[in-house]
Image (tube, rainbow, N blue to C red):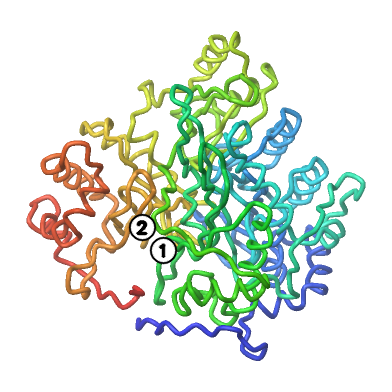
Amino acid sequence: MPKKPFEPNFKTPPDLWNPTERVKSNSYFVNRELYVQFREDFQAHVSVDVETLAKSYGIYLEFDRTKTGGVYDVNWMYMIRISIPGGGPITPAQWAFFDELSEKYTINPHINKPSLRLTTRQNIQFHWVSKKGVLDIVKTLAENDMRSLNGCGDKTRNVMGCPLSAYSDVFDANGWAQKAGAYFQLPLEPYIKVFELDPTRIRKPGESFKYGTNLLNRKFKIAFSALHRRPESGKLIPDNCVEALSNDLAIVPIAEKNKVTAFQVYAGGGQGERNNFSAMSTLAQPLCITTEDNLMQVLDAVVAVHQEWGDRENRQWARLKYVIKKKGVEWYRDQVTSRLGYPIMKPNPDLDIGDRQLHHGWIKLPKTGKWAFGMFVENGRLIDGSPNGNLKTLVREVVKKYQTDLMVTPNQDLLFINIEETAKTDFEADLKEYGYGLRNGKAYSTLRLHSGACVGRDTCRLTYTDSERFEPELLDELEKRGWGHMAESIGITGCERQCFRPATKTIGLIGSGLNRYQFKLMGDEAARHQGVPLIDADGEKMYLRSAPREKVADVIEVLFKFYKANAKAGESMGAYHQRIGMQAIIDHLRENPATAPLMERSMATDCVIE
């Protein structure tokens, strides 16, 4: 079908608002319906308006994708997303609530097992929840300082910050994530009323952002990157574990003489796209430099400008990246300056944001002198009886025994915090007892440790195909072929929303249909570059837009061999691709017998914004 030309409608007048905006403007009455419908037991789903507003409270209406039927026949369920600014810390008592609630409400009927899901935004998700479980989960966690508020919907999402930075002697990105998370949190009053929360058990924020009646135009993502000190040299190393530039708003610390003196602010990143519309994935652009004293004012102004200007007619163009694409970053800087009432410094385009650090294994914590252990959790799924062991029980028992706090990382992994030196040997033995470190009896490969996927089917209504279930099988095959040693990353999502940020990885795979995937290249393991579709030098043809599942490993193997045969010493695969250019990659894939048949089919590029 023809693609709609890229023409956002900024400062949209109310008579052109889309249906979602109309629901938000009527939130008082919809909240009343939300209260009633989540307490009804004669139907498993809720109305469209209630579903729209429920996202503000971290609740998604889903259905079992393996079954079909009419609205009353389908197996309705809910996903609940809990916001955890900076990934934690989560206390042992709080984790006990997560574990107990998941045991009660997250039973996957196909395998009869409960689970918890860690996410790339440092949230925790409950899947397969029935309607009767929604109120219990939200209320129990909210009254223990773990809220679903801001988990979804048109407002700032969970604010990210390097979890290890909470124990750094250089810069606490985690603390800033918590501060910004509290500042941009939605008003508590409707949340307390709808879920009948005990107000004496709800921590109130101080000064906060002024959301309009219609909230923001779309979701708005914020991330703080970090700096760490190398123990052996004392040198400060930037850490981009949060993949800061993939966010609408990113804050990167600037250090002079081993001390943080200022912050560079970036704006306009975002990975999600929309099929059948002109759309783009892009990294944020440098906006300004500011001091710590003025940082929150700058963040407020950046979000406020978007709240005023963002498109409220066309949701596919409502993200901040489209305002900056159309208006320019200099125009946006002028708008922010006007709101602040004082000038802001222009940015340094050459500032190094650092590599994507994964925080696996043992890490010494400078503030406490104790240790953290970073546990790889394949695709963030904590579940028992999988090829990766009994990870759900592992976390429950290890936290109980060692009384460690927990932190969720941006790579969907888990950090155990403040372990005594004398406990390290016993701690490792306990992990092994539950099967950690092995998949089907084999040690995790380097390629697996660097890769990952979103949830995909069967618990996401937006996805077209498998991602979480496909990724382990794909890596099994690549390891079997001898590629497990590759220090590169493969990211997979079930649709073009790209929740795992696959296009910032070495090889990105994006679901384009059932058991079909689009390839994106030019990203890299360090997450410094934006991956793009395979478009020829003329800009007219797009290749590998819909590669069949059974051929994906063949394409990746051809790409690995091409890289290994021609890369310079020490050159990463992403750097190699950037050096030779996309046309050389396309030519090689067209010439190789294993991939030539897939390259015979191409598509027009009119959905890509240049």
Mark 1 highlights which residue? 282
Q: Earlier in the sequence, mark 2 or mark 1?
A: 1
Mark 2 touches mark 1? (CB < 8 Å):
yes
**Residue 500 percent location from the top left of the image:** 46, 50
**Residue 7 percent location from the top left of the image:** 45, 85
Residue that lies at the very extreme toward the front in this rendered image: 257
How crowded pointer 1 is (Cα within 10 Å; few <14, some 14-19, many 20+) is rated as: many
Residue depicted at 24% across the width and 62% down the height: 534
Number of numbered discs overlaid on the protein picture: 2
Task: Examine the image and state in which quarter residue 35 appears.
Answer: bottom right
Relative to 537, 292 lies left or right: right
Q: Nearer the viewer, residue 402 or 384?
A: 402
Is residue 59 in view from this perspective? no
**Residue 52 percent location from the top left of the image:** 67, 68
Residue depicted at 34% across the width and 29% down the height: 445
Amino acid type assigned to the residue bearing label 1 in the image: Thr
Q: Is residue 445 above or below residue 335?
A: above
Q: Tell me the SS state at disc 1.
A: loop
The quadrant of the image that shows the N terminus is: bottom left
Residue that lies at the very extreme toward the bottom in this rendered image: 15
Amino acid type assigned to the residue bearing label 2 in the image: Gln
Q: Tell me the SS state at disc 2.
A: loop
Residue depicted at 80% across the width and 43% down the height: 140
Relative to 250, 150 lies left or right: right
**Residue 6 percent location from the top left of the image:** 42, 82
Q: CA distance from mark 2 to mark 1?
A: 6 Å
Q: Nearer the viewer, residue 386 or 429?
A: 429
Mark 2 highlights which residue? 530
Label at residue 453: none
